[in-house]
Amino acid sequence: MDATRPPLPRLAAAAAAVTLAVAGVVVAAITGGGPGPEPAAAPAGATTVASGSGPARAVGWAPWDRDAAGRPLRWDPCTPVRFVLRADGAPPGAEADLAEALRRLAAATGHDLHLVGTTDEAPAADRPLVVRTAEGWRWAPVLVAWAAPGAGGTPLGPHDRGVAVPVAVRDGDRHALVTGQLVLNAARTDLRPGFGDRADAWGATLLHELGHLLGLDHVDDPAQLMAAAPGAGPVALGSGDLAGLAAVGADGGCVATPSPTVGRGLG
Ligand SMILES: [Zn+2]
């Protein structure tokens, strides 16, 4: 914990229950396990794209997906991306490590990546995509949670460090990443807090999985943190990582994002 920052407020668990399968909305998810085998299962109602399984894996960076115009699929950089951390099960230093990973990725992308609080919400394959707030319906904040393999039906394998499940929604020509989950393996007690070495630092796993969440796929170059197996060495974003993060970041301008009420009949 960072003693210089006040405790984060606790948020209620997401209360809204909305069906994933909505006419006119395409939902897709990616899984990324970091070093080690990639999980094969998909969250219910989502389409899994096997990370880095295509024939043309880039050396420097690769987008997870592209929009109809061929541009890398992105979050809207003109709206803050909100994250919540599940305190239960998180290892020592988790909050500080997440905050530092978000700081590094915000610098690399130009996105406003905002850790808004802690939550008691558990990861779930059928997690609602939207939440009702005082201001109305919003896309659910990204949930970052440590949990046991397979918890809540999520595709976290027993040997994975973690998986990322970004969710993109399309409504006509509006197509953007809008929410997601990061599930870290609470059983991996061999991993250490901080950003010491990519071989065993939670910080490296957070940067890798958050890289997926922000729109990057695996690459073959082991010098990049987005390599499927980054090996050992300093926990630093490589030149390809930085180029990819810039490409899915703010430089491309605002992204037209579907409304969280699209197709759902929500008021
Ligand atoms: Zn991965």
Image (cartoon, rainbow, N blue to C red):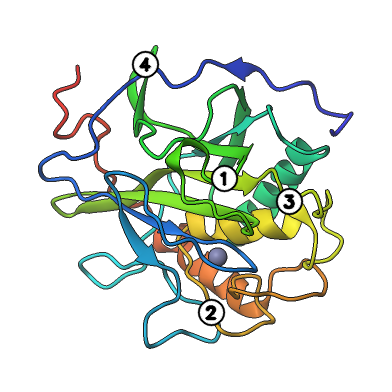
Q: What residue type is labelled 3?
A: Arg
Between circles 3 and 1, the one closer to the viewer is 3
Q: Which mark is residue 135?
A: 4
> Label 3: which residue?
188
Q: Can residue 129 be seen in this view?
A: yes
Vertically, is 40 above or below 229? above
- Which quadrant of the rendered structure holds the C terminus? top left
Left or right, residue 57 beside residue 266: right
Q: Which amino acid does label 4 sit on?
A: Glu
Instruction: Please report whichever mark, 2 or 1, sits nearer to the chain's N-terminal start.
Output: 1
Label whose residue precedes the other's in the sequence (4 or 3): 4
Residue 106 higher or lower than 152, as above or below: below
| x and y, in percent, of residue 158 in the image | 61, 54
Q: Residue 183 carries which label?
A: 1
Residue 219 disc label: 2
SS category of the residue bearing label 1: strand
Q: Between disc 1 and disc 4, whose residue precedes?
A: 4
Q: Position of residue 118 (x, y in %)?
A: 64, 25
| Label 1 CB less than 8 angstroms from ligand 1 | no
Residue 107 in view here: no
Q: Nearer the viewer, residue 137 or 146?
A: 146
Numbered mark located on residue 102 in the image:
none
Q: Residue at x 60, y 72 (%)?
A: 241
**Residue most extreme to the left:** 23
How far from the left and from the top, in percent, is residue 38? 52, 66
